[in-house]
Amino acid sequence: MAGVIVADTLQDGAGNSTAMDNAIYGSAKAWVNWNGASGASPTIYAAYNVSSVTRTGTGAYTLAFTNALVDANYAPVSGCNTDANNGGVVKLSGSPSGALYGKSTTALSIVACNSNNGSASDTNQLSIAIFR
Amino acid sequence: MQVIIHTNSNGGVSVTVPTGEISIQAVKEKDTPEGSIIVDDSTLPQGSDAQFFDAWELSGSTVSVNFEKAKAIKLAQFNSKAVEEAQKRQLNTLAGLENTPDNATWSASLTAGRASIASATTTAELVAI
């Protein structure tokens, strides 16, 4: 059923409450968790408001949002597992050099890298959450 | 599992995996360029070929590995690891620690590794180096 609830505060039965702003601005607008080292194509574990994950190169991905975000000033939060031998880090760009920055209302490009030498690298756990 | 593939701006292959929130046809129209095609991911390079994603090339609806590209990728990875190892060995030397194997043996192993890459004929051989 469609409808609108207008309130300033949310409260549960135990009396715990929070400002409505926390629910509106503090909840992820999109998120996805996937395996980038699963063979020929990535394996999506779970997602919300992400329609697809495109592998564009080793460690490099573009996430497309199911519903566009209000603007491109969102805050992406990332995490990843290590690759086979080294630590991992996620860069918010389309390539390890950062030259192909890609952040729009409809998509976000990221690249997972080896934290030792900065080269693109795939791992079995990659996560991105978008806050706005 | 069905995926969407297309040749990307680097001449390689991009593989788009739908999350299931919308149909694969809708993903194809919304998230991939015109000319993209839907294939079963079992038709994509598997095993050791899958490890050389940046050497994939699309012809028609078939994705295959450009072996010369794969060799270049392997050589770059090999050289990158050699540089890391060289840095560790240099630190060992400065710290007065012994390098194992000795420098001559290690240097010979690098030469042998590069020769193995040059003479490899399959991606499985490249992975084994």
Image (cartoon, coloured by chain):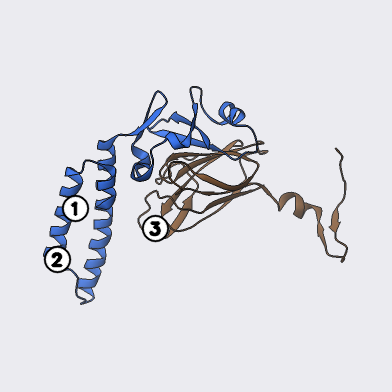
Q: Which residue is mark 1?
A: B113
Nearer to me, A8 or B31: B31
- Residue A84 — which label? 3
Can residue B103 be seen here? The reply is: yes
State the residue position of label 2: B103
Q: The disc labelled 2 sits on which kind of residue?
A: Asn
Q: Which mark is residue A18?
A: none
Name the amino acid type tagged 1.
Answer: Gly
Residue A69 in percent (x, y) is at 66, 39
Same chain letter for marks 3 and 2: no
Q: Colour of chain A?
A: brown
Front-lying residue, B92 or A45? A45
Tell me the blue chain: B
Q: Earlier in the sequence, mark 2 or mark 1?
A: 2
Q: Chain of mark 1?
A: B
A81 relative to A120, above or below: below
Q: Position of residue A65 (x, y in %)?
A: 62, 38
Q: Is residue A24 left or right of residue A125?
A: right
